[in-house]
Image (cartoon, rainbow, N blue to C red):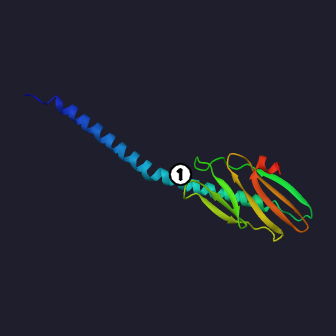
Amino acid sequence: MDNRGLTPVVSEVLLIGLVLLYIGLVTAVLYGSAIPEYQATSGAEMGDRVLATATEHVQQSVFPSYRLDARSSIALPETINNQAYSLRTANRTLILEHPHPEIGGRARLAVPSSVHSIEGQWRSHTPLSVRAVGNETGYRITIAASSEANDD
């Protein structure tokens, strides 16, 4: 029995098997660790930029004036890492909340002592609106979606 005709076929099948095994391993490593880690890192950086931009915008809403009813809005990204997020206030702090545990943060608002309260919450997919209302006794800052802030 002559088996010389099978040698090239078996050789090619083994080569194709090794190539497929290599591609499978590389794909598993990338999708198992490298790509999700990169997405989490880039999402966290985007979250930090969004929080810094929103904080700066809220801080700039109060300026020296005796009577103030100022409204401004800012367009922030609709998603971070392809997921919706929100901003809320607590104890003169702006808090970014995101479903991914590595994305989010807090930023203490540097506003004058004449600001008596900072309140509100905002959910992505709408422009962020900041409203500052005050007089000679003090100010109140509210964050909300643009349509909600204009209803007051």
- Please name the amino acid that badge 1 sits on: Gln
Image coordinates of residue 77 in percent, x first then y, are 67, 48
Q: Is residue 66 left or right of residue 143?
A: right
Q: Which residue is most to the bottom?
A: 113
Q: Is 150 situated left or right of 102 in this image?
A: right
Q: Could you tell me how many numbered marks the image carries?
A: 1
Q: Residue at x 44, y 53 (%)?
A: 33
Residue 91 coordinates in the image, percent (x, y) = 71, 67
Please, which residue is most extreme toward the left here? 1
Where in the figure is residue 2, as x and y percent of width and height? Answer: 9, 28
> Residue 50, how many percent across, how many down?
67, 55
Left or right for 124, reference 26: right
Find numbered disc 1 in the image and state the secondary structure of the residue it sits on.
Answer: helix
Q: Give the residue displayed 42% in from the left and 50% down from the top.
A: 32
Depth check: give the residue in front, 64 or 137.
Answer: 137
**Quick one: quadrant of the N terminus?**
top left
The residue depicted at 22 percent of the width and 36 percent of the height is 11
Q: Residues within 10 Å of mark 1 (few under 14, many from 20)?
A: some
Based on the displayed image, in which of its 4 quarters is residue 94 positioned? Answer: bottom right
Q: Nearer the viewer, residue 152 or 84?
A: 152
Query: Circle 1 sits on which residue?
Result: 39
Which quarter of the picture shows residue 67?
A: bottom right
